[in-house]
């Protein structure tokens, strides 16, 4: 099983989400512990090790390390804002 780490800004983004959306997104993130490459995950173009999964209009950007069995959640945001920093 992979362990999950959050970037501080990703934690803050999660806290700002409506509770109903936050619950589902957290379940999706927890599901990554068993499989960091689930159906629907897409490797981001132009980035070596970034992936994304979707929930409605929200995106979860993350990376993972198979050697250390860690998943690092980088950003959780609405689709209109999530790719601005990449």
Image (spheres, rainbow, N blue to C red):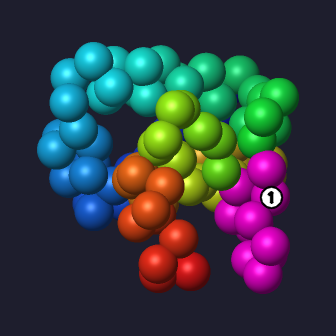
Question: Where residue 78 sits in the image (x, y, percent)?
Answer: 40, 52
Range drawn in magenta: 42-51
**Nearest the eye: 29 or 34:** 29
x 53%, y 32%: residue: 55
Q: Is residue 44 magenta?
A: yes
Quadrant of res 16: top left
Residue hosting label 1: 43
**Nearest the eye: 28 or 3:** 28
Question: Where residue 7 sits in the image (x, y, percent)?
Answer: 37, 60
Q: Quadrant of the N terminus?
A: top right
Assign a secondary structure to mark 1. Answer: strand
Classify 72 as above or below 31.
Answer: below
Q: Residues within 10 Å of mark 1 (few under 14, many from 20)?
A: some
Q: Is residue 20 visible?
A: yes
Q: Quadrant of the C terminus?
A: bottom right
**Nearest the eye: 28 or 18:** 18
Q: Is residue 8 left or right of residue 67?
A: left
Q: Is residue 70 visible?
A: no
x 76%, y 41%: residue: 41
Q: Is residue 18 left or right of residue 34?
A: left
Q: Is residue 16 left or right of residue 38?
A: left
Prevailing secondary structure class for the magenta stretch in the rendered image: loop
x 65%, y 57%: residue: 63
Q: Is residue 9 left or right of residue 51?
A: left
Classify 65 as above or below 50.
Answer: above
Q: Is residue 30 magenta?
A: no
**Nearest the eye: 13 or 54:** 54
x 49%, y 55%: residue: 79
Question: Where residue 12 sits in the image (x, y, percent)?
Answer: 20, 53
Question: Where residue 66 sits in the image (x, y, percent)?
Answer: 79, 48
């Amino acid at each position: 099983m992979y362990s999950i780490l959050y970037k501080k800004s990703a934690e803050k983004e999660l806290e700002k989400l409506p509770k109903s959306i936050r619950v589902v997104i957290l379940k999706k993130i927890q599901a990554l512990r068993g499989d960091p490459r689930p159906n629907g995950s897409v490797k981001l173009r132009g980035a070596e090790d970034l992936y994304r999964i979707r929930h409605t209009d929200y995106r979860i950007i993350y990376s993972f390390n198979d050697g250390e069995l860690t998943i690092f959640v980088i950003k959780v945001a609405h689709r209109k804002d999530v790719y601005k920093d990449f």
